[in-house]
Amino acid sequence: TASNFVNIVEVGPRDGLQNEKGTIPVDVKVELINRLSHAGLKTIEAGSFVSPKWVPQMAGTAEVLSGIQQREGNHYPVLVPNQKGLDNLLCLPRLTDEIAIFTAATDAFTKANLNTTTAESLVRLRPVAEQAIKNGLRVRGYVSVVIACPYSGKTDYGKVREVAKELLDMGCYEVSLGDTVGMGTPDEVAEMIEEVKKSVPVEKLAGHFHDTYGTAIANVIAALSQGIRTIDSSVGGLGGCPYSPGATGNVATEDVLYALQGSQYHVVGSHGSSGGVNLDEVVEIGWWISEKLGRESVSRAGRAIRAK
Ligand code: HMG
Ligand code: MG
């Protein structure tokens, strides 16, 4: 039986900002990450070592990593799509202890996101994972479009299971299952996780839900009910994938923290078991970064708490 401790992977500085059109200065990203770690978030995805031609907003990730105050025991993973990304990371002084590699459950999405097929992406990622591990890095894996694909419709959950298993076999310590499009319903999410659990221990899975249709928080609860204990979320509900047209941000970190208050689940934070992650601080950060981007926070809990 699963413990009731829930880990949050804060993906706002990466998934949240990667799709923004205007340039976000490095010092804003640094302040965002520092404030998130101050609020108690232990794992904060800091950016990506991807092609700046593909995702210009993530270009300054090395500067971001060297600018932040890294709290002992925290993790600041970065996305790495290929060998070149790992080479670029490893030729610098050690900036992080973790990378995330990513692929998808459909060829059409992998083609749009990585310019290759899913099978070929796995062939290319295996040596990247192995070399990263040899260099003392933890490797996390992502499978995108686990419920539906913007290009090929409903996803075959058996394919999600196969890809997740391959990522674990190449050394990933955890695989995050991404509803990239944000179309999933709680029943679909439960069914998909049940399928993946046939080949993969649930302790090695995380849930990553975009909120396009308003089901992300319900999907978080469905994933917890299935035994998943790691949830990806984004402060202020920021985000979207440039290769998933129309998809909105991730489930808001504030909304997850609010929904789990007083429940059987305890969110693990760096402020110890009593403190967890400070919801009020995360709400303030959600408003601060949203206003930097010229809009209001879309976190429902964030709006309600601010209005009180
Ligand atoms: P490609 O065009 O096939 O690559 O793209 P290439 O090897 O032909 O290289 C093209 C150019 O990019 C070359 O430069 C390379 O040097 C350079 P040029 O010679 O033309 O000057 N390049 C790089 N530069 C910096 N870092 C690198 C790198 N690689 C090549 N790592 C490639 C293939 C994988 C590079 C491209 O498709 C890419 O960068 N994709 C990343 C896309 C991305 O970041 N998507 C968003 C993240 S995934 C996501 O959001 C989903 C997730 O949230 C989960 C979910 O919601 O489902 C994780
Ligand atoms: Mg995402």
Image (spheres, rainbow, N blue to C red):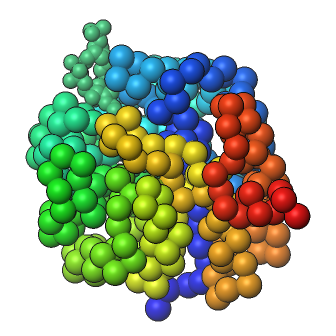
Answer with left or right where residue 243 lies relative to residue 286. left
Q: Position of residue 87 (x, y in %)?
A: 37, 24
Residue in front for this viewpoint, 146 or 118:
146
Q: Residue at x 48, y 64 (%)?
A: 214
212 vs 262: above or below: above
Residue nearest the observer in this picture, 261 or 238: 238
Answer yes or no: is residue 148 visible.
Answer: yes
Seen from this angle, which residue lies furthest bottom? Answer: 1
Residue beneath the point at 33% across and 42% down: 244
Q: Residue 212 vs residue 69: left or right?
A: left
Find residue 114 and report its image quarter.
top left
Residue 268 in the image: x percent, y percent? 67, 69
Indicate the position of residue 210 as horizontal and vertical percent values. Answer: 45, 56
Q: Which residue of the protein is positioned furthest toward the right in this rendering?
A: 308
Q: Is residue 65 above or below residue 176?
A: above
Where's residue 308, x and y in %?
88, 64
* Residue drawn at point x = 34 percent, y = 81 percent: 187
